[in-house]
Amino acid sequence: MKTKVWIALLALYIVWGSTYLAIRFSVETIPPFLHAAVRFLVSGVILYLWRRAAGDPAPTVSNWKATAIVGAALLLGGNGLVAWAEQTVPSGIAALMITTSPFWLVLFESMRAGGAKPTWQAIVGLFIGFGGVFLLVGPSEITGSGVSFDTFGIILLLFAPFFWSLGSIYAKGADMPKSTLLSTGMQMLTGAAALFIVSLIKGELNGFSVGLVSTRSWLGLAYLITFGSLIGFVSYGWLLHNAPISLMSTYAYVNPLVAVLLGSLLANEPLNGRILVAAAIIIGSVIIINTARQVKVKTQPLQAVPDGDD
């Protein structure tokens, strides 16, 4: 069993760490919200039909309402904004910014009725983490680096984990299906609908032609559907029931490192001392926060699409 756990965990590290680069390749010639809508529609249909055929009970209307709210928050507000940002921001930087989701989780959990209040270790982790974010994307005049990033893209990446965490906290008390994979499939379907609506409102279909999509973008989208959404989520769902939560949480520390390295190796994205130091600070703060949360209270894993990419 231990061997299977580590194989599944290694797959999760590599697959979800690589999805940020796949998103970047996809949105080079496919509009960001349209690409995400297609990705989650295909993945959602496959997951939903599979779990229903496997015997998972039919979801109720209340289940659909809850997953629609979570799907919109996580996949539209979270993944959609990441895809939009990656048109101008390197994939590795995007991955590091999304790693800050636990910052918001701590804050939202403390404001929720009956939610756990942050420990002093978590508060220290928050201050350290935000310092790392400032070092990563702050003005180059202050941080002392000649590398700067698109301001609008960085703002989108600040809001993405905000929505992701908001949806995750809501999912804790929502009427979600007991099956994690069925719930994930439903979130993908409802999230895809929200993404399509925003894509239409944003006018992404105006002038868009399938013939103009590059081979690299098609491959990126195919990778996101098969590996990112299906293999990744199946591995995650299996690990939820076969691995300690403390071990599961390590993917949040490893994924951004994989993303940064792959972005540098395969897409010539910037990788300098400032980025490496900032990455160490951010990931270190997340470790402090997660450790403090696990010591303070033992909770069940959220029945929501996990931090991965997205």
Image (spheres, grey):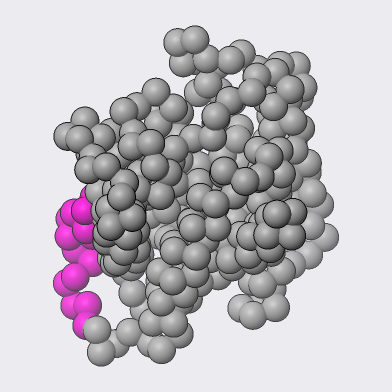
Where's the N terminus, which quadrant?
bottom right
Residue 122 in which image quadrant = top right
Asked if residue 137 lies in the magenta stretch, the reply is no
Q: Position of residue 66 (x, y in %)?
A: 28, 33
- Seen from this angle, which residue lies furthest top? 114
User: Does 154 sit left or right of 138 as displayed?
Assistant: left
| Image-based side of 105 in relation to 2, left or right | left
Provide residue 45's location: percent of width, then percent of height: 27, 61
**In the rendered view, would you say 101 is above or below 308?**
above
Q: Which region is colored magenta?
A: 193-209
Q: Nearer the viewer, residue 243 or 281?
A: 243
Q: Is residue 4 visible?
A: yes
Determine the residue positioned at 61% across, 78% down: 267
Please give the name of the residue rendered at 79% of the width and 49% of the height, measured from the top-left corner.
280
* Image vertical order of residue 220 relative to residue 45, above or below: below
| Residue 98 in sight in this render | no
Vertical placement of 19 versus 172: above or below? below
Identity of the residue drawn at 65% across and 19% down: 297
